[in-house]
Image: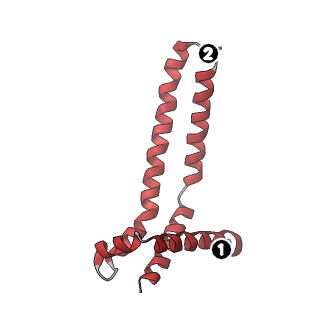
Amino acid sequence: MHWIFVVIAGVLASEAFLWLPLLPVIRKVTATAQKSGKVLRSSRISDHWKERILPSYAWVIGKGSVMFFAMLMIALAPVALLGLVYPGGLAAWGSVLLRPTVIVVLCIVSIAYIWLRLKVVRV
């Protein structure tokens, strides 16, 4: 019975990941981190300018990290919410999700769903 819930959880989480703008946030954080690294390593940029620009880079990186965490929680919310309808409640659903076989099946279902959704269906 719990395998039906596991498959539904994998599909719902995968769909949420596909709809959320995760990649632009990751790209922006990565690009900003690379820019800040270049600024730090550059000997042609004065320490005064570094002191002025690095806090703004830190703000962008911090904001992007919080956004990524929030989107991750939003994407995983359907998995947690399935515990409300799972026989035995949230505690039983949580114990099911921590089983290694369930984690492997969730990964396989998610990868297969995303592959099918992106390559075959093209919605």
Q: Residue at x 70, y 70 (%)?
A: 119
Residue most extreme to the bottom: 1
Q: Residue at x 30, y 72 (%)?
A: 90
| In the rendered image, the vertical position of residue 31 relative to residue 25, given as above or below | above
- Label 2: how many residues lie within 10 Å, few (<14), some (14-19) or many (20+)? few
Q: Secondary structure at mark 2?
A: loop
Q: Residue at x 55, y 41 (%)?
A: 29
Q: Is residue 91 left or right of residue 5?
A: left
Inspect the image, locate mark 2, and give the three-letter code of the amino acid beneath it: Ile
Q: Can residue 123 be seen by looking at this rendering?
A: no
| In the rendered image, the vertical position of residue 7 relative to residue 57, given as above or below | below
Inspect the image, locate mark 1, and give the three-letter code of the amino acid beneath it: Leu
Residue at label 2? 45
Residue most extreme to the right: 119
Towards the viewer: 106 or 27: 106
Towards the viewer: 3 or 52: 3
